[in-house]
Image (cartoon, helix red, strand yellow):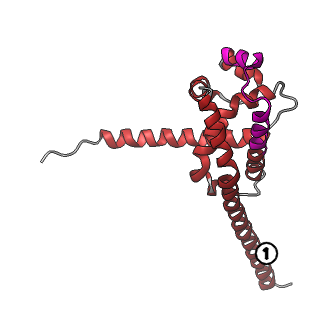
Amino acid sequence: MDFWGSVLLALSIAFAGWQFHKENKRKRIEKAIELSKFFADEIIPACSQIIRKYDELNLTTEIENAINLEKVKYFDEQELSQMNPDMAEKWKNAYNPFMGDEREKNVTLLNHLEYFSMQFTSKVADEKAVYQSLHQAFLKTIKLMYVYIAMMNKNNNSKYYTNIIELFTSWEKRRVKHTEKEKKSRVKKGSHKQPRI
């Protein structure tokens, strides 16, 4: 093969690789859009029911005040006990409001959230395509479900909902980073004084 033939072959391979990458990205975005519909149709209604149940039991504010998202890492009973020993003890002593029918609703919701999360953590879908639209509802739901997940994860060897934990950790870090960046930007804008006329 002569020099120009080699160059043409290399360019063809590079173009094929670029086309493959472009097509793969398009499919991942399409999958993300499909998952946002799944989130809207299956997860949001179930989340609304859970939030109503938490509100009825006066748990929403209690959990929101008790769980520091920036310290959440392991989603297990030990972490919960260190973060808020009173809440961990309360749930251990049969306070858990998610027994019977409520337990089934929670497990179904968490299984849907795990399926949703798995698509992003395995890179089947592009999580950046839906982050801005879905992160608030996702993070709030996981924060409210944190105690339930933590109480299920009694040891680190065999954890439940690992994809939820991974996506939550990623999106929470992004949210914190974005919030800090926004605060700095506002402070910077506020420090510029208007010129006197």
Residue 7 visible here: yes
State the extent of the magenta-drawn residues as a range. 86-111
User: In percent of the image, x 56 and y 27: which residue is there?
Assistant: 61
Q: Nearer the viewer, residue 177 or 135?
A: 135
Asked which secondary structure carries label 1, the reply is helix
Dividing the picture into quadrants, the one containing residue 161 is: top right
User: Does 58 appear above or below 82?
Assistant: below
The residue tagged 1 is: 13
In the image, residue 116 lies at what x, y percent?
74, 50
Magenta segment includes 188: no
Neighbour class for label 1 at 10 Å: few (<14), some, many (≥20)? Answer: few
In the image, residue 137 lies at what x, y percent?
60, 44
User: In percent of the image, x 80 and y 80: which residue is there?
Assistant: 9
User: Number of labelled discs?
Assistant: 1
Magenta: main secondary structure: helix
In the image, residue 50 lies at what x, y percent?
66, 37
Residue type at tag 1: Ile
User: In percent of the image, x 73 and y 45: which residue is there?
Assistant: 113
User: Does 123 appear above or below 8?
Assistant: above
Q: Nearer the viewer, residue 72 or 93?
A: 93
User: Does 66 appear above or below 133?
Assistant: above
